[in-house]
Amino acid sequence: MADSSKKIASGKTKGNSGPPVKQKKAERKGRIIKLTDAQHSDPQGLQGLTPDNAIFAMDIGTRTVVGVIGMQDEQHFRIIATEVCAHKSRSMIDGQVHDIEQVASTAAEVKNRLEARIGFKLKKVAIAAAGRVLRTSQVRVEKNLEQGVEIDQDFVSGLEIEGIQRAQMMLDDESAAGDKAQFYCVGYSVINYYLNGYVISKLTGHKGKTVGADLLATFLPLIVVDSLYSVVNRIGLEVASLTLEPIAAINAVIPPDLRLLNLALVDIGAGTSDIALTREGSVFAYAMTSMAGDEITERIAQRYLVDFPTGEKIKTALSSKKENVTFTDIMKTRHTIAVTDILSDLEETIRLLASTISQKILEFNGRAPNAVFLIGGGSRIPLLPKMMAQQLGLPEDRVAVRSRDVIKGMKYDDKRLSGPESITPYGIAVTARMYSGKDFLSVTVNERKIKLFNSKKLTTADALIIYGFDAQSLIGRSGRGVTFSVNDNVRRVRGEHGKAAEIFLNGKPASLDTPLAYGDKITVIPAVDGKNAVVKAYELTDEYYTGSVKLNGNSVNISTLITINGVPADKDTLINDGDIVEISRIKTLGQLLEAAGFTSFGDHDIRINGVAGSDPDHVLRDMDQIICSRREEITEKSVEPDPADIEETTLYQQLPDTGSTNYDAADGDIEAAVEDDADCCVITVNGKATRLKNGSQHIFVDVFNYIEFDLSKPQGTIALKLNGKPAAFTDRIKHGDNVEIYWKK
C-alpha cells in the first residue's frame, strides 16, 4: 500500500536523492491527470488519506456518474479527488436506473479512475436517490428520562430511529388498499427537539424528565432503492450510507443557522427536479417534479432535428459565452445559429419548466419563500431563474444559481468539479460524514436481503416490519366462533386458536425483540390462522336417535326432531351464527302418551309388544307396538281383542272408524264438510279440506295417514306449517286448522 502511494506521490526515482518532483503526468483512459504540489509532498498518501478515513461518495445521475473522495481533518472536510463519466446511452431515465449493467459500467469507470489516483481499493460508497415517487411522513416521538441521567448521542440516535420506524408504520397504514408497494426510508430530517416540552436545538448533555423530537422521514419505493444497490454491488462495493439527493444538497448549501429563513433549494438534474424547504430552523418538506433538463434537450432535438447527445451539447453551449452554436442535424446539414435565436425557440419550454417547479414550491410551502437556491446541471439553463422569480412574485436577485463556493467548512485539493452540478455529489459526501456510525445494516429475511437504518439497537421486529410482516400475520387469528340458542339456552362454540409464527435467527429460535447483527439470517414460518367453528345439528344433542313406533296401529315418529329458525333440518345441517335451534324427541312411553292426549294412565290398559305394563319411564325402541285402550271398553267386551284387529283400530279407540273424506276447499268451506258428521275433525291440507277420524285429540304426524305423501323418497327437506307457521310432528291439530306439507328444495 505504501509503495503504491509513493509511486503516485513522487514518481519514478532512484533512491531518495535529487530535487523533489514538482509534477507528474499519468495517463488515465486518454486523460492527463496533474497531481498538485501538496499531493507530492505527502509520502503517506494524499493529504493523509487512508482506507479507514476515506469517504467515497457517488452521485449516480441521469446523464453522468460523479465520484468524490473526501476526508475530514481537524477543521475542514477536504475534497481529495473527483471524477465524472457520462453514460454511453440513456440507461437512466428520470433518475431511475433502467439498464443496470450499463449504469454499473459507468460507475465502475469512475471507481477505477479514483482508485488509480488514491492508490488503494475502495470498499464502501455513499449514494443518494433522486426524489422520484417520493413519499414523506412527519412524526413526533417522546420518551421519559431517568432522573439525573445525562442524555448522550446513543439515546438521541435511538429516539430518532424510533421516529423513523413509527413513520414507516404510518406510511403503511396510509397506503391505499391493495397497494403492495414496499417503501424504504432513504433519509430523515429533525424538525425540532424537545426537552420537558420546550423546543431545544440540541439534546446531548442535558438532563430532564421528558424528551421528544419531530422528524420528517422520506421514503422511496424499494424497487428504486434496489436498483441502486444492484449497481453498487455489481462493481464490488458495499453501500455505506444512502440518502435522498435534496437532503444531501441541503446539508451542503443551507447550514442550520440559515434554516430559520423560509428558503427553497431546487436541484434541477436531467430527469428530476428535487425540492427541499426550510423554515423556523428545520427542513419541513421535500418535493419533486419529473420535469427537468431533459425536457429542454428533447425540445432542442425536435426543433433542430438532432439526436439526443447533440441536443445535450447544444443545451450546454447555451450557458457558455459563445454567441453562436454550430451543429449537424440527422440529415447531415450543418447549421450555425445564434444563441439568442435558440433561446427564443426554447422560451416556451423554459417557461413551462419554471412554472412547474414554482407551482410545486407553492403547493408545499403555501406561499412564495424568502429566496430560492438553484443547483444541479439544469440550473445553468439561461432565463430559468428570471422566469421562476416572475412565477413566484420575487425580485430577480432572490432566485439564484449556487456553486460550491457557498459550501462552508470545505476545502478543495481537486478543483475541477466546481459548478452547480457539484453541490449534490459534495453534499452526499458531507451527509455520509454527518451520519457516520448510522449506516445501514444488512440482513436476510426468508432468503431476501434487506437493509435497515442502523440504530445499533435493531431487533428482529424491525427487520420484519421492513420485510412486510404485520402484527396479525405474526400472531395468527383465531377462527370465527358461532353463537346460537338451543331450546332457549344460548350457546357459543369458539373457533380454533391460531398458531403464532415461528422465528429463527441463524437457525436458532428467536423472538421479536432478539437483537440483530450485520449479516444475520432470519427465517420466519408464518402464523397459521385457526379454523372457523363448524357445528352440525346432530352434535347439539347427547343422542341423535331415529326410529318409529306404532300406537294403536298408527305409526308415530320417535326420531330426534331438529328445527332451525322454525324450519325442520337434516342432522348434518350446519349451524350459523344467530340460529335458533329447537330439539325434541319422544323418548319414553309417558312422553308418547302425553303427546297423544292421554292424561291419565290409570284409566287405560297399556301393552308394549303384547306385554302388559304401564311404566311411563319405559324407553321406547324402534318398531315397538303399543296398545292403549280404556279399561271400560275391555270390560264391556270381556275378551281381549285379536292383535290383528288391534292394528286396524283407530289411534285412540274412542269412536268407531268413520273413514275420512277429502273435500275441495274451493267448492265449499270446511263447515260444509262437517255437515256429514257433527263430531268429526276437519282441517285443510295443502288446500284440500280433509276430515280426520272421529276424535278430539290429533297431532301433526296423524295427517300423513290421510294424504298421499311418500316420506320414503325424500325430494329435499320436508317443510311443515300449521296455520302459516313452522310446525313439528308432535304439534296438536284442532278442528279448522290449515296444514301445509311440501318438499323444500
Image (cartoon, rainbow, N blue to C red):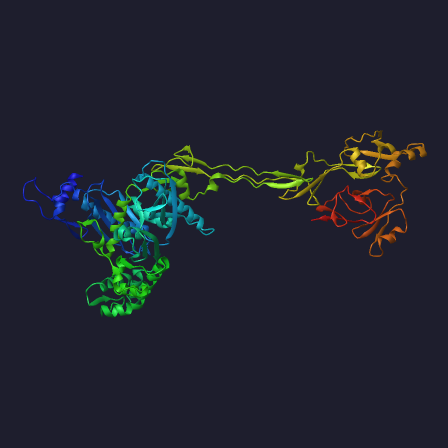
Rendered view: 90 above or below 162: below
Q: Position of residue 35 (x, y in %)?
A: 14, 48
Q: Is residue 266 left or right of residue 697?
A: left
Instruction: Say which of 47 and 656 sits in front.
Output: 47
Q: Position of residue 483 (x, y in %)?
A: 62, 41
Q: Is residue 93 left or right of residue 699?
A: left
Q: How many marks?
A: 0
Residue at 50% of width from left, 36% of height from top? 499
Q: Position of residue 254 (x, y in %)?
A: 27, 53
Q: Is residue 172 visible?
A: yes
Which quadrant would residue 241 be assigned to in this image?
A: top left
What is the residue that sits farthest to the left in this orientation? 18
Q: Position of residue 434 (x, y in %)?
A: 27, 45
Identify the image quadrant of the N terminus: top left
Instruction: Say which of 7 and 441 sits in front.
Output: 441
Instruction: Say which of 493 and 692 sits in front.
Output: 493
Instruction: Say which of 658 and 596 sits in front.
Output: 596
Q: Is residue 106 visible?
A: no
Residue at 68% of width from left, 36% of height from top? 541
Rendered view: 64 above or below 612: below
